[in-house]
Image (cartoon, rainbow, N blue to C red):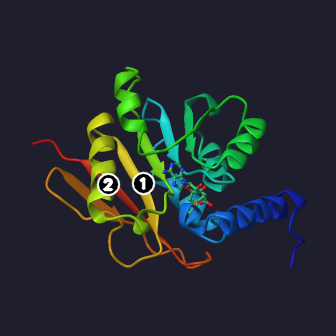
Amino acid sequence: MPPIPQAARDETLTFLRAWFAAPGRIGAQWPSGCALSRAMAAAVDPRRPGPVVELGPGTGPVTRALLERGIVAERLVLVESNAAFCRSLRRRYPRMTVICGDAFELPRAWRDGHRPPPAAVVSSLPLLMLKPAQRLRLLRQWLTAMTPDGRFVQFTYGFLPPVPLRAGMAASAAPRVWRNLWPARVWCYSPVAG
Ligand SMILES: C[S@@+](CC[C@H](N)C(=O)[O-])C[C@H]1O[C@@H](n2cnc3c(N)ncnc32)[C@H](O)[C@@H]1O
């Protein structure tokens, strides 16, 4: 087995420390693995213009996969509530916009700030810890704020869609990623005109 790089070990330790301090805020015990991070990034089309918003980037595995996918750093807006993660993300990715705050406050601030509609919102937020109505509100706000062909991407360890499907939206699921602790599935939501 190849040795685990020091950077990856440091990231996992940082993540574990944050989880022990506030398990309810972090959700998962481990950062997403490469396979899951790539499955998240694969749901984003880098040719669609507009910012790409990442909610809950943590130590940045999905961020890295988005860069590998061809999304340039200047297009990425990261929203993370954990201050230590934010410091580390800012250090590593000085060309990205890192907002240290609550992802649930962002849709309103985004609209009020007259920012361009995002091409995609990629979320690793621990949504299953929230009530379905709260998840639905977040999803609806973003589906309204994004371009008509935009995508809201969310992974879940569960077997049901992470946000209940309602009128005005479409959803599809990618195959479950088994090479991840824990196995997870990526769901993709998009607005439906009507
Ligand atoms: C399950 S972890 C995922 C981290 C990383 N994207 C990964 O896949 O390994 C969830 C992340 O969302 C962040 N988070 C939780 N609630 C948040 C909120 N309301 N606003 C912004 N970030 C939040 C946590 O601090 C944590 O970094």
Work out whether residue 32 or residue 177 is closer to the camera in this orientation and state it: 32
Quadrant containing ligand 1: bottom right
Residue located beneath label 1 in the image: 153
Vertical order, 25 against 149 (above or below): below
Disc 2: which residue: 189
| Residue 194 relative to residue 16: left or right | left
47 or 101: nearer the eye? 101
Q: Amino acid at mark 2?
A: Tyr
Quadrant in the picture for the N terminus:
bottom right
Q: How many marks?
A: 2
Please give the name of the residue rendered at 90% of the width and 71% of the height, measured from the top-left corner. Answer: 3
Residue 111 sits above or below residue 78 on the image:
above
Task: Work out whether residue 126 or residue 183 is closer to the camera in this orientation and state it.
Answer: 126
In the visual, does 103 lie left or right of 135?
right
Tell me the kind of residue under disc 1: Val
Q: Secondary structure at mark 2?
A: strand
Snapshot quadrant of residue 154: bottom left
Question: Is any part of residue 46 visible from this angle?
Answer: no
Residue 156 image offset from top left, x and y in percent: 45, 69
- Residue 47 is left or right of residue 23, and the answer is left
Q: Are marks 2 and 1 in contact (CB under 8 Å)?
A: yes
Q: Residue furthest left?
A: 194
Locate the C terminus and report the quarter of the image it occupies: top left
Q: Residue at x 49, y 44 (%)?
A: 102
Residue 122: numbered disc: none
Q: Quadrant of residue 109?
A: top left
Cβ of disc 2 within 8 Å of ligand 1?
no
Q: Is residue 129 visible?
A: yes
Among the two numbered marks 2 and 1 on one chain, the one whose residue lies closer to the N terminus? 1
